Image (spheres, rainbow, N blue to C red):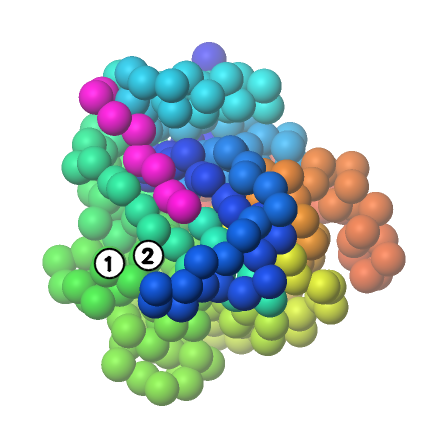
């Protein structure tokens, strides 16, 4: 049986040092009040989408080690199907959040998803980073992300004409375009892909899709840990898009989902269910998207 969404990026085990008064500087030691272990990387998007009601799979190698066992158990607990292979080591990130900011240190082996692992779950949609867009099954709706390294590498040789959306943060959008204004960057990116969505952190988000441009204000919350907020923004955007929500509503739901997540340490702890998101949305004047007879497909993005 196929899934609604397959996340085809690496999953990490996040080790979060919660309760720091400040991120330590060089040579400085700070004490945390708690050490938390939780899924990170693509596992955040996968679990976030699953809690919003999408049948979700994570196509990512995981280590044949205690860290991999913990991640496989966490995925199963949220109903996320794991498809991949066992490798020697699981990627790990140490996360140090403090004062609405964070520092991270990451160990990341070179293992990556294969096209066969993605296709095995027969996904209606996939989310992949720029270097891996060619791995998307031909019939799957494609959602694309980027990190700093991918953004620096640029778009040369990457075909995004069939993507449903490119979702990046402001820094990534500027790196990809060479511009110094996120709105201008979004409009330039919309020339190479049908929909460019740019997250702005405390500034909300904006999107340029064909001739439509929207900007959505942030939802005011007290940020405790912003780790994974972008991953959950992407999950909620895809969820709303799969339900056929109009562009502005897609962005508003995504902004809200991301904002709700930063109120507690770890992204997965802050990833709310569809019912909780609907309740919060109602307070923002948002009505839960009603599934459309025809889900968003790759063909409709053309």
As drawn, 263 above or below 64 = below
**Mark linked to residue 150:** 1
Residue 12 x/y as whole percent: 38, 36
Q: Residue at x 26, y 81 (%)?
A: 178
Q: Label for residue 200?
A: none
Looking at the rendered structure, the number of numbered marks drawn on it comes to 2
Asked where in the image residue 290 lies, by quadrant, the reply is top right
Residue 271 as seen in the image, left or right of residue 40: right
Residue position for label 2? 146
Q: Is residue 124 magenta?
A: no
- Left or right of 142? Residue 206 is right
Can residue 63 be seen from the camera position used here?
A: yes
| Residue 63 drawn at (x, y percent) | 29, 22
Residue 214 image position (x, y, % from top left)? 58, 73
Residue 279 percent location from the top left of the image: 83, 46
Is 90 inside the magenta-drawn segment? yes
């Amino acid at each position: 049986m196929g899934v609604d969404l397959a996340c085809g990026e690496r999953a990490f085990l996040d080790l979060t040092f919660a309760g720091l008064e400040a991120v330590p500087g060089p040579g400085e030691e700070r004490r945390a009040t708690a050490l938390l272990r939780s899924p990170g990387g693509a596992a955040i998007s996968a679990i976030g989408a699953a809690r919003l009601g999408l049948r979700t799979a994570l196509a990512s190698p995981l280590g044949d080690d205690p860290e991999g066992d913990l991640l496989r158990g966490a995925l199963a607990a949220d109903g996320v199907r794991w498809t991949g292979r066992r490798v020697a080591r699981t990627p790990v990130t140490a996360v140090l959040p403090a004062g609405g900011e964070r520092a991270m240190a990451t160990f990341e082996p070179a293992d990556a998803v294969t096209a066969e692992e993605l296709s095995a779950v027969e996904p209606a949609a996939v989310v992949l980073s720029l270097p891996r867009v060619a791995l998307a099954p031909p019939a799957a709706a494609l959602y694309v992300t980027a990190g700093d390294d991918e953004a620096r590498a640029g778009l040369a040789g990457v075909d995004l004409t069939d993507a449903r959306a490119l979702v990046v943060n402001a820094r990534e959008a500027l790196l990809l375009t060479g511009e110094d204004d996120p709105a201008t960057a979004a409009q330039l990116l919309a020339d190479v892909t049908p929909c460019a969505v740019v997250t702005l952190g405390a500034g909300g988000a904006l999107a340029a899709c064909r001739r439509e441009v929207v900007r959505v204000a942030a939802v005011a919350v007290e940020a405790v840990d912003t780790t994974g907020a972008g991953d959950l923004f992407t999950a909620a955007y895809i969820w709303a898009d799969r339900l056929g929500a109009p562009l502005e509503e897609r962005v508003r739901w995504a902004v809200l989902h991301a904002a709700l997540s930063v109120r507690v340490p770890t992204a997965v702890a802050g990833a709310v269910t569809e019912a909780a998101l609907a309740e919060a949305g109602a307070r923002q004047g948002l009505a839960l998207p009603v599934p459309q007879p025809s889900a968003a497909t790759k063909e409709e993005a053309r």
